[in-house]
Image: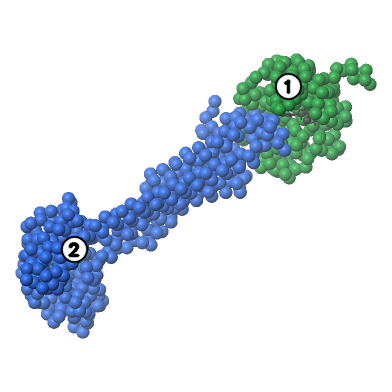
Chain colours: A blue, B green
Amino acid sequence: MKIPFFDIENWKEIGSTLARNKTRTFLTAFGIFWGVFMLACLMGGARGAEDLLRRNFEGFATNSAILFPGNTTMPYKGHAKGRRWQADHTDIERLRLLLPELQTVTSQSSQWNISFRNGRHSFSGQVWGVEEAFTEVMLPHIESGRFINEADVKLQRKVAVVGKKVANELFPGESSPVRKTILVNGISYTIIGIAYQTSEIQMNDRIDNVVIIPVSTFQKSFNRGDKVDLIMMVGRRSADFSELESKIRRILYSRHQVDPNDKSAMWFLNISDMFSKVDTLFLAISFLALFIGLSTLVAGIIGIGNIMWVIVKERTQEFGIRRAIGAKPIDVTVQILSEGVTLTAIAGMAGISLACMALGITAMLTTNETSVPRFQMTLWQALLIIGIFILLGTLAGLIPAIKAMRIKPIEALNDK
Amino acid sequence: MIKLTDINKTYPGAVPLHVLKGINLHVKKGELVSIMGASGSGKSTLLNILGILDNYDSGEYLLDGTLIKDLSENRAAEYRNRMIGFVFQSFNLINYKNAVENVALPLFYQGVSRRKRNLLAMEQLEKMGLADRSHHLPGELSGGQKQRVAIARAMITNPSIILADEPTGALDSTTSRDVMELFRQLNRQEGKTIVIVTHDPGVGKQCDRIIRISDGLIIPDNSIITSN
Ligand SMILES: Nc1ncnc2c1ncn2[C@@H]1O[C@H](COP(=O)(O)OP(=O)(O)OP(=O)(O)O)[C@@H](O)[C@H]1O
Ligand SMILES: [Mg+2]
């Protein structure tokens, strides 16, 4: 016996049947097309959406925390409450020494509303004093030049990394003002780099709008002694900041004579905690996408089965005629299943193609200079979706097909 | 060609209906016979059994020397395809296929290639005088034309017998005559054995022999004579 799949005659017959029954073919195909399209969009879109969201935190160390010393709210060891205390380099050294779980401990200090000047061009914004290690917490994009390095800090160099926006304001039309001079609060600095950020996380302001100088230079220029505004920490892989928080508080509180119970004397921002919440959100989104996808799939399959059922009922007489003139039961079954599979494959392919186009356009629209969000699907995902549809479509068509196989020619022919 | 011995058929149901009550019938090769009888007498039932569309309960049916009894669906389909051509009152053409495709369809189930099927189908349609209608859908054809397409389809596999259930039932008298003329031609020129169920005495007259059936039994020829 011939295997129907390899029989060109069979395909021609299916082709002509589908082509002649345009409305029915279209309706069935559209159901499948839509199901595949939705599923593909969801599967391909979920990762893209995640990338888009993640882009907001790009370059920021996930396992990190920031502490902001504030005012005490409890009297302690002869100190009245409401006392302002400040962290300094000794605190940083102590944290480094006492907590080996911390990979990086560094600081950021800032001075607000400082005027920046280049000849007659001026702009005002924040000046930050940082160490090289700042980049381990938050990696800025360097457009040209370089960031602050260890030697800059050690030698108190009068060098500055200038935010892109500041550079554009002060040096309009110049491609790169690196090695030029900028007046910050009346003191001249040599520009060593131009920096910007694409993420949405801000430390006081966007890097684009500020001027960054070595912390040592900063402390000297603004009479800060060795005080810093805030301390930033990055933990090693195993470090858990929810556990470390109390240790960190103890280390700082004991030195600055703050009541160990005075939680409000220091704000501890646990960034890794926030990230894990975001991770949970992504997980929830993925589950939602999966759920909607599966629902679409089930609805699609039921739709196919339903349409196949109607088609078989509608075509009872046709199958009766075919049986009378020599079609075997299996011929009828194969015909229905092949029609279903052919439709599913073609409509599924169309659905996937359109979904890929939609994803591609979304990706194009959301791409920026730093990242291309993954609005895309792998070949395997595409094949998987079509495969699932064909498999389930066949299963859904199987019941009507078996029903059609059972049609007795006389019954069908009497059915007028 | 057809030999029925004591065929019985009962339709099961709440009230089982004994429709054929011991049919004995012999149709020779090349005969053109008609089956006549009152409505409900069992003509269609008999024809369905002859066409292997339905089973019978007891007796024996030999078609061209082959015993037709308790065949599997596959076997039955194969025999129908190769040995029998059907013509129905309501034509039973597939409405979305044009004339050639309808005529060619039985050959599809023999695995004949599309080119060859359509070629043979065209030949048949030409014989039926329908060459110019070959690409029309059934809906675009007159009743007489549809029936000729159906006859062409019945002829395409070159079957040993043609079974027609009231082939002129839906046609006017002129068209009926044309269709009957066609059957006679097939009978004379191609030597086809043809069995036609009909109510129309005019159709019966054009056949070699009339088999009368009444209440599930065949009325013997001599009783017709005596009743006459
Ligand atoms: N599938 C069936 N199930 C039950 N009873 C049936 C079935 N088909 C036919 N019958 C009954 O069997 C009897 C004979 O039916 P049949 O169709 O053979 O009659 P007929 O001679 O062809 O009549 P007509 O001239 O009206 O076509 C009728 O009483 C009919 O109701
Ligand atoms: Mg009848």
Q: What number is the disc on residue A321?
A: none
Q: Is residue B94 visible?
A: yes
Residue A46, relative to residue A403: is it above or below? below
Q: Residue at x 18, y 83 (%)?
A: A119
Q: Residue at x 9, y 58 (%)?
A: A96
Residue B102, percent from left and from top = 68, 37
Type of amino acid under label 1: Lys
Determine whether, in the image, residue A394 is placed left or right of residue B137. left
Residue B69, relative to residue B112: is it above or below? above
Residue A323, percent from left and from top = 65, 31
Q: Which residue is drawn at 86% across and 37% down?
A: B173
Q: Crowding near pointer 2: few (<14 within 10 Å), some, many (20+)?
A: many
Query: Whole-Å distance between the Cαs marked 1 and 2?
Result: 94 Å
In which quadrant of the rendered image does the C terminus of chain A lie? top right
Mark 1 and mark 2 on one chain: no
In which quadrant of the rendered image does the N terminus of chain A lie? top right
Q: Can residue B158 be seen in this view?
A: no
